[in-house]
Image (cartoon, helix red, strand yellow):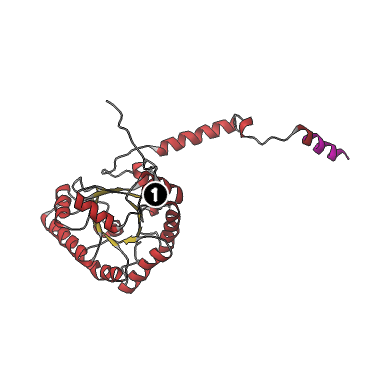
Amino acid sequence: MSTPTITFNTSQTARKKVTTLTLRQKKERGEPISMLTAYDYPSALAVDQAGVDVILVGDSLAMVVLGYENTLSVTMEDMLHHSRAVARGAKFALLVGDMPFMSYQVSVEEAVRNAGRFLQQGNMDAVKLEGGAERVPAIRAIVSAGIPVMGHLGLTPQSVNQLGGFKPQAKNAAAARKLLEDALALEEAGCFAIVLESVPARLAEYVSKRLRIPTIGIGAGAGCDGQVLVTHDMLGLFDRFTPKFVKKYANLHTDMQRAIGAYIDDVETRRFPAPEHTVSMPEAEWDEFLRGLQD
């Protein structure tokens, strides 16, 4: 079996900035949309240079970067800090900031204010928030303020306690109808795209065909208009667990442990630093240094 050839988008001057219109046009042409998370400058640089369409500064950073058990503990300040770092590294992908728990649920006014902070202070292009028809007033207000909104239905991690854990959603007829109704409501409210997480593939495909706006699937099958994964999951950097729907493209956690172990061994056996890692000093200068100590 031959190894597939992978090419990277290294011609950055030829790329154009991805916009919400770009995503709509890709859906109309039947071209899949690629989306990944990033939380810092180097990962944003790598993801952007690889040519991904959308970078999500996800509240998943609570778990994969900050070490929390779920996404509920991450704050607006956390999200803005990481958003700014990502914006410094990514120049072409559409940048979406994930609105954290309790940043949009309290009131419509607070939702608009916090969404604006993602653009003003975090240098994002758009925001994402979770929930169905109950979020329509906030979404309408945010969109009316000139801020693009991406919706999120299905498994909504910020509602993990209400859902009873990280479980697939919309597996019965009533829940499937509710998800479709919510998706149509989010589209009507002005969302430019909707993430569908951990829902049956046939339902996600049906919803995708009913909507004019793109759907981005995560654990929702190949019938969505695009796909998103948490970069730490697909690179094998997060060692606590890997969701069933993740395809691992690398195992960097193990590679890092191996490299760090080799470093420790080199230090303990004095193989590192070697002469090529060391700053030299001309012999004449060293001799003069020694003479100065004798004076």
- Residue sitting nearer the eye, 98 or 245: 98
Picture quarter containing residue 245?
A: top left
User: Considering only vertical position in the picture, is 151 above or below 64?
Assistant: below
Q: Disc 1 on helix, strand or loop?
A: helix
Estimate the x, y position of residue 172 in percent, counting from the top left.
13, 53
Estimate the x, y position of residue 266 in percent, counting from the top left.
57, 31
Left or right: 175 with respect to 287? left
Picture quarter containing residue 125?
A: bottom left
Estimate the x, y position of residue 170 in percent, counting from the top left.
17, 54
Residue 135 visible? The answer is yes
Report if residue 288 lies within the magenta region: yes
Left or right: 277 with respect to 89? right
Classified by dominant secondary structure, the portion drawn in magenta counts as helix
The stretch in magenta equals 286-295
Residue 196 visible? The answer is no
- The quarter of the image holding the C terminus is top right
Q: Which residue is mark 1?
A: 64
Which residue is rendered at x = 33% and y = 74% of the image? 109
User: Considering only vertical position in the picture, is 266 above or below 225?
Assistant: above
- The quarter of the image holding the N terminus is top left
Which residue is rendered at x = 39% and y = 49% of the image? 64
Amino acid found under the numbered disc labelled 1: Val
Left or right: 41 with respect to 69? right
Estimate the x, y position of residue 18 in percent, counting from the top left.
33, 54
